[in-house]
Structure formats: C-alpha cells, structure tokens
C-alpha cells in the first residue's frame, strides 16, 4: 500500500516486460514460484505482453496460449486470482488474434473445443472451463479505447455471430444439469460452479449486440438487442422457468445472479416476438414475479431485493400498461407489487438505493394511464395514492429516528431526494385530491405543533429540531407537487389545491423569519428556496397565469393577488437570507442562485418580469446598499475561508442585470452603484503605498476581483462596458498588476484576477467595439499583455513542481492566460499590425510569453488537463489563422513542439480539441501550398518571395515525416475510427494529399495490398472516387467537392472492410 513500494513494483514489472527474456522468466515464475503472488506477477506480465500495440509473432502467441491451457489443466488447485489472471491472458490472445490465419485456418477460434475438454474433467477443471468462456465473453465486449473502434466492432460482431449463441446454450444446459442433481449448499465446489455458470450467462446477456457501447453506469438503456436467431431459446418457457427455479433453490449470494439474468430477460427487445408470443412471454415473467412475492423470504437479502426492484422497473420499461393489464393474474400481482412497495418505503433505512427502481415502475405506470385503450381495469387509481401516502408518511417518520440515533439524514443527499421527488410527482398527480388532502392535514398538524413548541416555556431543542426536519420534508413535497403541474392535464380544481398548499409555505416563511436572527434551520431554508423556485417556474411570469385559481386562495389568506406580490415576497426573502444567514454557505449559495435565475431577462416575459422586479423596494435597497454592513457574506474577516468569496460573482452578476434595466447612459447612477467597490479599491491602494497588511489586502483584492468579474459578465452593451472601463483604467488595473507580481505563488489570489482579465477581454455582443477615436481596445490589450507576461515569467521561476501541485500552481493559471489571449486575438477590436508599425512591443512580448509557458508544459499534460487543452488548442487555431508570420518565425524546436501537439490532438476524444487541431493544421498546410504556388509562377512583376514562407518550407523539407505522420493519422481516423467531426478532418486532408502525393500513393498501396485479392479492386475503386473531380488547388469549391467525396469514400470503405473476407484492418498500422 506504500506509494514508493508500489512505484518500485511497477518499475520492476515494466523492466521485466521490456526484457528479451520476459517469456522464459514468466515460465520460470509459474513453474517454480513459491507464492501465488509470483504466479500472479507472471500472469500480469504475460497479459501486458500480449496486449502490446505491436503484437508478438503468431506462433509465439499460440505457444503461450497452449502453455497456459496445459498449465491450468495440470494445476487446477491454484489460487482463484491466479487462475483468473491466466484465463484473462487466454481471452486477450483469442480476441486480438480472432481473424488471424495460419495454414488456411483461423487458429484462435477453436477455444470452445478446448473448453469442452475441461468440462469432461474433475469439478475444478469444469469450473476453469466455464471461467475461460466467461472471461472470453467479457473480453470480447470490452472496448479498448487505445485501439481502433472499428476493429473492436468487427471482432465482437464476428464472435456474436459465430460463438455466442452456442456458449449461452451450453451454459443453460449445464445449469439444467446442475439443478437436476440434489443441491448441497455446503459444497463449496458446487457453489463456485453455479456462480461461474450464472456469471457466464449474465456476460452473454450483457453483450453489446449492436455496438452502442452504452455507459455501464447508466441504467436507462433498458433494451437488450437479442439477435433474431436466438428466438428459439427465448420462446421456450423452460428457459425463464430455469432461472426462477435457480432463484428459489440457491443461497442469496447466487440467487441474486439468477435475478440479474432475469432482469436482462425482462429487457429483451419487443421486436423479437410477435404479439401473441410477447403476451405469452410477459405472462411467464409475471407468473415468476407472483411466485417471488408470495414467498418473499429471499428478498430479505439486500442484493436480491435490489435486483428484484430492477426487474420490476424493467417490466414497465419494455411492456406497455395495456399489455400488463391483459395478463391473467394482473389484479393479484399489482396488489402484491403495491404492498411490496409500501413495505419497502416504510423500511426507509433498508437498501435506500433500490427505491429509485420501484418509483420508476409506478411513475411509468401512472404516466401511461391516459394512453390505455383496453377495457380491463388498471387499478392504479386505487394503489397510486397509497404509494404516495406511504412515501410521505415514511419520510416524516424517519426524522425523529435519524436525529435520535445520529443516523445519516436522507435529506443530506439532495441529488437522490430530488430524483425520487420527481418520480413521486407523477405518481401523486393520480387522484391528486387525495394527495393534497393528506398534505394539508399533515402540514397543519406539524405547523401547529411547531408553534406550540416555540411558545412553550420549556422550549425542548430536540423536539424543535424534529419538527423542523418534518416541516422541511413537507415543504419539499409541496414544492414538488406545485412544480409538477402540467398545463395540458391541469384543472382549476388542481390549481386551487396548489393555492391551498402554497399558502401554508408562505405562512411558514413568515414564521421562520420572525425568529431571526436568534435561530435558523438550514434544512427548512433550503426546502423553502426549492419551493420558491418551483413556484416561480410554474406560476410566475407566464402571461397565462393571471387568471389562475392558485391566486384566489392566496389572496383570501395572505393578500397575494398576482405575481407582483409574489415577486415582492421572493425579494424580501432573498434580502432576509443574505442579511441574516451570511454564515450558512449552502443557504447563501442557493439564495444567490435563485436571485440569479430571477434576474436572467430572457425570453420576452422575463424582460417584463425584470421591469417589475426593479420597482420592488427590496431590490432598490440591494442596489444601493451592497456592502458587508448589510450583507455579511461580502465581508472579508478571518472567519471566512477564501472559497466563501466565490458566491460574490453570482451576486454581482444578478445585481448588475437589475441595474441595467433602467441604467441607459446614466453615468452618475453607475458611479453610485460602484461606490462600495471604489472605497475598497482606494483602501487597497493606500495599503499598497504604506507598509501594508498583506493578508487584509489580499482578501480585499480577491473579493474585488470576483465582484468585478460578476459585473463585467452582466455588462453586455457598449455604453455600460465603457463606463466600467473608464472606472477601472488606469488606476485600479495597476493595483491588479501589482497583486499578480506579489502573489504569483498563491492561486487563491491569482486565479480570480486572471479570470477577471479574461472576462474583460471577451467581446460579447460587440461590447468592446469602442468609438473610432478611442484607443481603449489597444490600451486594454496592453494591460492584458503586461499581466500575462508578468504572470508567465514569475510562474516559470517556480521550477519543477510535483504532480499534485502542477495544475493548481501553474497549469490552471496558464490555461486562463491562454483563454484571455484567445479572446483578444479573435475579438476583432485590436488591429495588431499597429504594434509593429509604431515600435510597440506589447504584442511580441505576449507571444513570447505564450511560447515560454508552452514549452514548460509536457505534451501529456496538454491533453490530460481538459481546461488547459480547451484553451490552448483554440488559441493555436487563432494564431495559425491570423498570425502565420509569428508561427514561421519560431525556432525549429518550438515548431516541432507545436506540430507534435497538433498531431497528438488530432485523435483526442474531445471534439473541441480535435476540431481545433484540424483547423490549425489546415491553416498551416494552406499557407505552405499558397507559398509553393506563388514560387512556381513567373509573373511580369518580380514579386519578392516571402521570407516567412521560405523558412517554413525549408523546415518542412528537412522534416517531411511530420506532415506525413499527420496524413496517416487523418486517413486512419477516416477509414477505421468512429469519426465524429468528418467535415473538420476533410479540410486539412486535401492540402496534405496535394503536398505529399507520393506518400499518399504509398499509403494507398499499403492498405490495398494488405487485403485479400477479391477486395483489392473495390478498395482501388474507392480511392479513385475519393480524388475524382478534385483539382490541384485549395479553393472553397474544390474543398467542398473533396469533402463530399470523402463522405462517400468513408462509407464505402467501411462497407468493404466490414464484409467477410476482409483482413483485419488493424494489421495495417498507418501510423508507423
């Protein structure tokens, strides 16, 4: 477990793999190793060896496979993890050599025949045989992202078509044999065998049959695409019966695997069956459910319980309510399922993660009710209210237990709570009257108890906490049900009920706020904010709501007649929270998010909303008094950690949006709004000029940088942005420059300042297009240039940093500098030619800083850190598009670094990166091509040949392999990979082909000769079509023609290489 020892072990392992004696060493370890770990080391070594990109010779791999098969056959009592590791090596060899031919035989495909020999031996041999099949099925399904995906699909599809059905049938017949014998559950070998067989079936059913390689963590892709030729297996009722019998006969550890298989059986695609067959199959599934629920002893095991809940959810995912209703035992089964759900909800502490699946079942059932056409009763109106009631009451009952026993509070896991509430929301709308009556009753009862406790003389804190916990749950329920209003199904009665429920929450808000500042409950506050947000989305702002019955009840009780009054309540609540709950980070953060959502003036009805908002007194108060005196969270005292200051950006973005509604060109109003920040900046300036308090100045500056970034983000017009620029330049911007100089080692300080500068450089909505007589654009760029140069030089003085410090201390800052520079270069508000013309070196300096910072970063880091790669590659695209003279002036080693980074980025998974690389490469190639074209022309005017072009051409002639390598990568991507940005890839490819026609012909010849004779003509035809009608130029029309050709070429190549008889595409390594 010690890190140093682990690294040492890894080093030894790598040395062993790279040594020429690796195979003999592994053999020695297996035969003479005294511990299981020595044998495991040998197995791991072999696994890495056979998975290498450059494979071992075929004969050698056959020898390794046969050796391991004989080794495990002669030593079946090895430690299970050693056998597992060795079996994995066999699976890898088989997968990677699936299409390899030796003496006209597909030599790695006789694996099932080898396994059958194991099945004739002892029980231990039998288990090893099943393990080999299981591991092979899993390995075939495993996508290795370091290899071409087309190659993986080809192997997996061939395995599916030739072997998988046979493996599944073999496994089912072996399970039948196992079940036919009397099971002795104490027999360890028999248990182990049953487990391996069930795992094998599960691996077969989990196979990615059609290549959509879904994320395994997602449970939403609930259809198993069983091949049509497997129909016979699924139509036999014995198949399902076998797994239900296994569930009832095996101990919990194994019965849950039987249930996992049943989950996959229940998820079989609908189109595998005709309608009568599907009804019969569903009938068998429901019969099995009934048996399990009538004998529920096995469900007391959490594993079984979880899989059974998944099984129930899949029933509704793949079958329609109309089909379920027609099943013979439907009324009894739905009653059993309802009782099971209610019991599960009441035992909230048992397997909480499984509740999601039960709620999914009921949610989907209730959502289907309007579409059921059969005469049979669905009975959901009987059971759905029961489910809702069980959920609500169980959550209220859990509160005292959680508080008394100090258990984990379900409310703390908000993601799960919101997910479950969303599901419950649909269920609750079935017989909504019953739900509302229950909630009103519970709310009144709990609110009265709470009031009594507050006013009683003995004030028991524990009791008060319990009541507050219950009220928090009730407010979440009300918010959920109000937010679940659907326009097309909603009635006036439902709206009136929403009004009844909402009244109670608004009254609770007054009750809670009356206790301030003495006491406050975080959970209730978060629940109230959730309710307010749901109410806003449903009943505020939309023009249809003025007639809504929701306000009828609220005007009677609270005097709230329309959304103007509601907005006033919202804003008063926001101001109260920001004033009195400054120490409670979650409440402040959620309150600011709510304020932010209210302030976004889009679409049209939201603009009307903003106009209403700015007339509210609470909003006017915030706009005039945004200081720490009124809002403590804006304070910078030592009690606050630096991360607490983050929420200030959101606060100022929202405030500035509200300010903008009536600001126009009123500079005085803007000055007044900025007054608190002006005071802070003046204080910092004074501290800087005297012998200063570092910590205080630092905190103030971090806060100011975050505030200003929020303000700058919201100023999206030229007039308002100019006011901010005039306010900050030059006095206050120099303070920020000084801070970067002083505290470059502290990312907590530099990051907000650099992000502020990056925000300033963004020409959003053309706000930076200053008047023609204004030099502001150039002045702003000079300041950015100074800051980036200062930061770049200082950060490089830190020297080498450890792996865990390199991102926070250095790479994060560099990535922000790059995105700021990119915004400036493509913002269109600075004429960069001016700098050279007037001898101003700010532009040159910032480009040199870019290069210095770049060279201090390794290529692997460039791609490994997403934010860095997403700022570097688009910046490089800007530079190659508009500043090729800078690129050509770079030293050869820098050019090689940049071109290598493009080459590596071409295959990146992130399309932002790969598309930027393609664009950059295209600009470079086009520049070269144009230069060559000019050089070849003899015109009357003796134009001077560009020195820049000459330099780049000379460099490329000395290093021809760079562009050739990139052409190989792009061709590989087109032919063998799942190319997601085809258009981007086609643009540089044409230039590369025209510049390297000889190399392109070689590539083409290599690919064609690697295929069987019957394929060669087809592939040759594909390549001819690719260049048909394409001329020797890079004009847009010609490029478009090539892009169209390439699309057809890609499709035809895939077709040709996919069909039988094509050799393994991976055998052509075009990257070499």
Image (cartoon, rainbow, N blue to C red):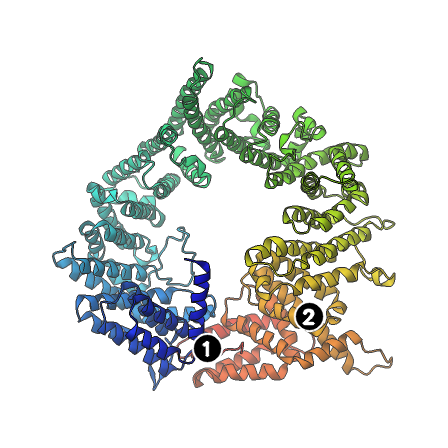
The mark lying in front, picked from 1 and 2, is 2
* Rendered-image quadrant of the N terminus: bottom left
Is residue 689 shown to the viewer in this render? yes
Is residue 1040 shown to the viewer in this render? no
Q: In which quadrant of the rendered view does residue 992 lie?
A: bottom right
Question: Within 10 angstroms of label 1, few (less than 14), some, or many (20 or more) residues?
Answer: few
Cβ atoms at labels 1 and 2 below 8 Å apart: no
Instruction: Using the image as rendered, state which of residue 320 and residue 54 is in the foreground.
Output: 54
Question: Within 10 angstroms of label 2, few (less than 14), some, or many (20 or more) residues?
Answer: some
Instruction: Using the image as rendered, state which of residue 523 and residue 804 is in the foreground.
Output: 804
Up-down relation of residue 669 to residue 701 (above or below): above
Q: In which quadrant of the rendered view does residue 600 lie?
A: top right
Q: Is residue 585 left or right of residue 206?
A: right
**Numbered mark located on residue 894 in the image:** 2
Q: Which residue is drawn at 40% across and 56% down?
A: 216
Q: Find disc 1 in the rendering and name its residue.
A: 54
Q: Name the spot of residue 441 as percent of width and height, x first.
A: 39, 21
Earlier residue among tags 1 and 2: 1
Instruction: Using the image as rendered, state which of residue 199 and residue 763 is in the foreground.
Output: 199
Q: Name the spot of residue 390 as percent of width and height, x first.
A: 33, 31
Q: Is residue 471 left or right of residue 206?
A: right
Q: In which quadrant of the rendered view does residue 135 lie?
A: bottom left
In the displayed orientation, state which residue is furthest to the left: 182
Element type at mark 1? loop
Q: In this view, does 893 lie to the left or right of 501?
A: right
Whole-number angstrom distance, CA of label 1 to CA of label 2:
30 Å
Element type at mark 2? helix
Report how many numbered discs are placed on residues in the image: 2
């Amino acid at each position: 477990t010690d890190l140093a020892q682990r690294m040492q072990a890894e080093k030894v392992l790598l040395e062993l793999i790279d040594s020429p004696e690796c195979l003999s060493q592994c053999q020695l370890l297996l035969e003479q190793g005294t511990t299981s770990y020595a044998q495991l080391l040998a197995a791991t070594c072999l696994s890495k060896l056979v998975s290498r990109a450059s494979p071992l010779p075929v004969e050698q791999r056959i020898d390794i496979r046969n050796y391991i098969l004989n080794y495990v056959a002669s030593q079946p009592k090895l430690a299970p993890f050693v056998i597992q590791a060795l079996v994995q090596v066999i699976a890898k060899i088989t997968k990677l050599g699936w299409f390899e031919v030796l003496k006209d035989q597909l030599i790695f495909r006789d694996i099932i025949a080898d396994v059958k020999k194991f099945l004739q031996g002892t029980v231990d041999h039998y288990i090893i045989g099943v393990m080999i099949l299981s591991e092979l099925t899993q390995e075939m399904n495993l996508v290795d992202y370091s290899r071409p995906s087309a190659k993986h699909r080809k192997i997996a599809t061939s395995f599916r078509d030739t072997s998988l059905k046979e493996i599944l049938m073999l496994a089912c017949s072996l399970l039948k044999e196992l079940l036919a014998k009397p099971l002795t559950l104490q027999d360890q070998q028999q248990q182990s065998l049953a487990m391996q067989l069930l795992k094998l079936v599960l691996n077969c059913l989990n196979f990615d049959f059609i290549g959509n390689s879904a994320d395994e963590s997602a449970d939403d892709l609930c259809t198993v695409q069983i091949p049509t030729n497997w129909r016979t297996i699924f139509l036999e009722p014995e198949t399902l019966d076998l797994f239900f019998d296994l569930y009832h006969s095996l101990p919990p550890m194994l019965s849950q695997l039987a249930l996992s298989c049943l989950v996959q059986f229940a998820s079989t695609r609908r189109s595998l069956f005709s309608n009568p067959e599907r009804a019969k199959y569903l009938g068998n599934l429901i019969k099995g459910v009934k048996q399990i629920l009538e004998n529920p002893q096995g469900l007391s095991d959490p594993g079984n319980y979880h899989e059974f809940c998944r099984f129930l959810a899949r029933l509704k995912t793949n079958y329609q309510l109309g089909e379920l209703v027609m099943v013979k035992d439907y009324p009894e089964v739905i009653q059993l399922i309802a009782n099971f759900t209610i019991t599960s909800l009441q035992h909230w502490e048992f397997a909480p993660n499984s509740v999601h699946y039960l709620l999914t079942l009921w949610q989907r059932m209730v959502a289907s009710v309007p579409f059921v056409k059969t005469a049979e009763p669905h009975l959901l109106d009987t059971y759905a209210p029961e489910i809702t009631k069980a959920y609500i009451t169980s959550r209220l009952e859990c509160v005292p237990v959680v508080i008394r026993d100090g258990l984990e509070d379900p409310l703390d896991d908000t993601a799960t709570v919101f997910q479950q509430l969303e599901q419950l929301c649909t269920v609750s709308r079935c017989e909504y009257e019953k739900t509302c009556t229950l909630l009103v009753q519970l709310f009144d009862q709990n609110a009265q108890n709470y009031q009594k406790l507050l006013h009683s003389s003995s004030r028991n804190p524990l009791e008060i906490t319990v009541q507050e916990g219950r009220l928090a749950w009730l407010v979440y329920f009300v918010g959920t049900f109000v937010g679940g209003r659907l326009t097309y199904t909603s009635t006036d009665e439902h709206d009136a009920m929403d009004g009844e429920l909402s009244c109670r929450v608004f009254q609770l808000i007054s009750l809670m706020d009356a206790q301030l500042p003495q006491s406050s409950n975080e959970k209730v506050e978060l629940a109230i904010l959730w309710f307010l947000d749901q109410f806003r989305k449903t009943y505020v702002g939309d023009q249809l709501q003025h007639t809504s019955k929701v306000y009828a009840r609220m005007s009677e009780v609270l005097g709230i007649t329309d959304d103007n009054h509601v907005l006033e309540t919202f804003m008063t609540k926001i101001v109260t929270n920001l004033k009195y709950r400054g120490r409670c980070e979650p409440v402040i953060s959620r309150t600011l998010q709510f304020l932010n959502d209210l302030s976004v003036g889009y679409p049209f009805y939201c603009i009307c909303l903003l106009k209403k908002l700015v007339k509210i007194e609470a909003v006017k108060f915030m706009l005039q008094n945004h200081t720490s005196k009124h809002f403590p969270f804006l304070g910078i005292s030592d009690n606050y950690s630096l991360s607490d200051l983050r929420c200030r950006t959101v606060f100022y973005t929202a405030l500035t949006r509200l300010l903008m509604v009536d600001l126009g060109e009123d500079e005085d109003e803007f000055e007044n709004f900025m007054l608190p920040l002006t005071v802070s900046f003046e204080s910092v300036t004074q501290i800087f000029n005297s012998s200063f308090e570092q910590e205080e100045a630092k905190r103030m500056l971090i806060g100011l940088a975050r505030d200003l970034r929020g303000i700058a983000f919201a100023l999206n017009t030229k007039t308002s942005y100019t006011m901010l620029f005039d306010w900050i330049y030059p006095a206050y911007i120099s303070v920020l420059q000084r801070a970067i100089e002083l505290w470059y080692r502290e990312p907590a300080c530099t990051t907000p300042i650099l992000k502020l500068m990056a925000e300033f450089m963004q020409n959003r909505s053309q706000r930076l297009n200053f008047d023609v007589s204004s030099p502001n654009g150039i002045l702003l760029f000079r300041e950015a240039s100074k800051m980036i140069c200062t930061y770049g030089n200082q950060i490089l003085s830190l020297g080498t940093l450890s792996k865990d410090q390199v991102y926070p201390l250095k790479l994060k800052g560099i990535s922000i500098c790059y995105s700021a520079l990119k915004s400036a270069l493509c913002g269109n508000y600075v004429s960069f030619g001016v700098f050279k013309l007037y001898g101003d070196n700010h532009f040159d300096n910032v480009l040199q800083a870019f290069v210095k910072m770049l060279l201090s970063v390794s290529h692997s880091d460039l791609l490994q850190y997403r934010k860095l790669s997403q700022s570097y590659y688009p910046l490089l695209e800007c530079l190659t598009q508009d500043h090729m003279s800078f690129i050509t002036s770079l030293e050869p080693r820098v050019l090689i670094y940049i071109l290598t980074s493009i080459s590596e980025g071409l295959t990146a998974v992130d399309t932002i990166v790969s598309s930027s690389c393609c664009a950059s490469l295209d600009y470079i190639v086009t520049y070269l091509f144009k230069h060559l074209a000019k050089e070849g022309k003899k015109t009357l005017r003796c134009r001077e040949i560009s020195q820049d072009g000459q330099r780049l051409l000379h460099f490329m002639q000395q290093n021809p392999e760079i562009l050739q390598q990139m052409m190989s990568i792009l061709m590989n991507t087109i032919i063998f990979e799942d190319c997601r940005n085809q258009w981007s890839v086609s643009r540089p490819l044409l230039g590369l082909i025209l510049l390297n026609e000889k190399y392109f012909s070689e590539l083409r010849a290599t690919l064609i000769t690697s295929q069987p004779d019957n394929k060669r003509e087809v592939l040759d035809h594909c390549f001819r079509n690719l260049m048909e009608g394409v001329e020797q130029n890079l004009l847009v029309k010609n490029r478009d023609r090539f892009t169209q050709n390439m699309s057809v070429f890609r499709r035809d190549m895939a077709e040709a290489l996919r069909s039988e008889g094509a050799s393994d595409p991976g055998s052509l390594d075009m990257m070499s």
